[in-house]
Image (spheres, rainbow, N blue to C red):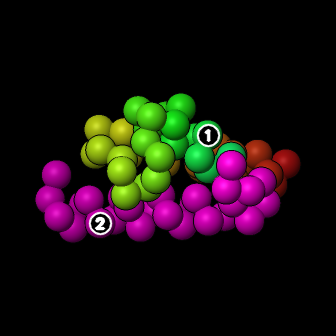
Amino acid sequence: MTKAERENWLCNIQDYATRVARQLGWETVKFILNEYGGGASSIEALTSNHYEAVWNALFDYEIGMKD
């Protein structure tokens, strides 16, 4: 993964984490990071092999808030 790809993933994860946190609170984001991010306690602590799973979970939560 290139540096640009990593930065893009992290930017997208942060964006969706903020959206989810606004509606459901940071505790929900922390749960997602822990559950889908290999026990990560923050976005910065994620390893690249968990980016997709965390982003997908955040995306699903965000879509669910629109229903």
x and y, in percent, of residue 38 in the image = 41, 32
x, y percent for residue 64: 76, 45
What kind of residue is marked 1? Answer: Phe
Residue that mark 2 sits on = 7
Q: Residue at x 62, y 50 (%)?
A: 29
The residue at 74%/56% (across/down) is 25
Work out how far the residue at label 2 is from the one at label 1, CA to CA, in angstroms.
22 Å
Q: Which percent across, then down, holds residue 49?
A: 29, 38
Residue 23 part of the magenta-drawn span:
yes
Q: Which residues are magenta?
A: 1-27
* Image side of residue 23 versus residue 28, left or right: right
Q: Main secondary structure of the magenta part?
A: helix
Front disc: 2 or 1: 1
State whether residue 22 appears in this view. yes
Name the residue beneath numbered marker 1: 31
Q: Is residue 35 above or below residue 58?
A: above
Image side of residue 53 versus residue 30, left or right: left
Residue in view at x 79 percent, y 60 percent: 23
Q: Could you tell me the amino acid type at mark 2?
A: Glu
Residue 7's place in the image compared with 48, above or below, is below
- Element carrying mark 1: helix
